[in-house]
Image (tube, grey):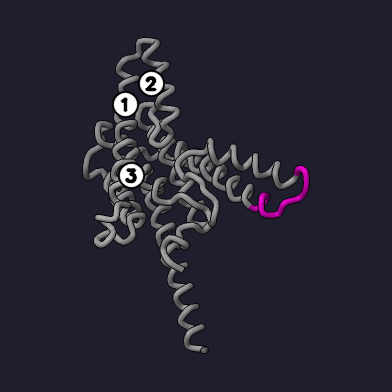
Amino acid sequence: MDFDAASRSREVAAMLTLSGGFLDAFTYVGHGGVFANTMTGNVALLGIQTATGQWVQAGRHIPPLIAFVFAVFVVHLLRLDAFAPSIRRPALVCLLLEIVFLAMAASGVLGDSDVWLIPGISFVATLQTLSFTHIEKLAYTSVMTTGNLRRAAKKLLEGLIPRYDRTALHDASLLGMASFCFFAGALIGAFTTRMLHDRALWLAVLLLVAALVRIGVLVRRRDDERGSQIAGQ
């Protein structure tokens, strides 16, 4: 099993989605009502607050939007053939960058200014969702839930009407799990941010490290099984 296949496991998707919900709650509760991942929310609040004359608060939603676009640009560059010889696993690079950034933010070594913290989180979270795009063979997103929830409901109906479809119900369970994990991550993030403020980010770091370790275990297990099969031939 290679890195890409291992990163598609249910367990890895659950931990990544928990961290996605966590980070949205962290920035919203602890840093002025701004979303880290949910750009739809940021755009809606930007429009509402601009219309009501809340210029300062409206301006807070612009940096994460810029960071989101910049992250899309960076991931596109990493996937170009020109970078392939030097960066064999761009998803791994993005995950490690996210872990390092959040650990630095949690430790307070860079201060707690929203000027860099919120767009920084938006940037690394976008790297995550663009790098880890599937649960098993099913496309999903680990840092927002609208698409996951919509497709989970659609798959559930396809699995029951007009006839029983085991594959559709399996897909519905995967997307439903992702939707629930995002909710659970937001719940945990809101609660711990109120208690620990920026130190709450250590929980997000632990989730991402656990996802990385799980990927490594799956890769190693598959390599051992392959080696045993070759030795037995």
Residue 28 % position (x, y): 41, 31
Residue 163 within the magenta-colored segment of the rendering: yes
Report the front residue among 95 and 166.
166
Does residue 163 appear anywhere in the picture? yes
Question: Residue 224, relative to residue 46: is it above or below?
Answer: below
Q: Earlier in the sequence, mark 1 or mark 3?
A: 1
Would you place residue 47 above or below residue 191 in this image?
above
Q: Dividing the picture into quarters, in which one does residue 32 lie?
A: top left
Mark 3: give few (<14), some (14-19) or many (20+) Cα within 10 Å: many
Left or right for 192, reference 183: left
Percent x, y of residue 96: 32, 55
| Residue sitting at x 38%, y 21% | 46
Residue closest to the far left: 110
Res 29 seen here: no
Which residue has dot 2 on it? 46
Which residue sits at x=76%, y=50%?
Answer: 164
Using a 10 Å C-alpha cutoff, classify the residue at mark 2 as few (fewer than 14 neighbours), some (14 to 19) or many (20 or more): many
Earlier residue among tags 3 and 2? 2
Amino acid of disc 1: Ile
The disc, 2 or 1, on the residue closer to the chain's N-terminal end is 2
Q: Which mark is residue 26?
A: none
Q: Residue 71: x and y, percent?
A: 31, 41
Tally the numbered discs.
3
Is 55 inside the magenta-drawn segment?
no
Which residue is labeled 1 in the image? 62
Numbered range of the magenta stretch: 161-170
Amino acid type of the residue that numbered disc 3 sits on in the rendered structure: Val
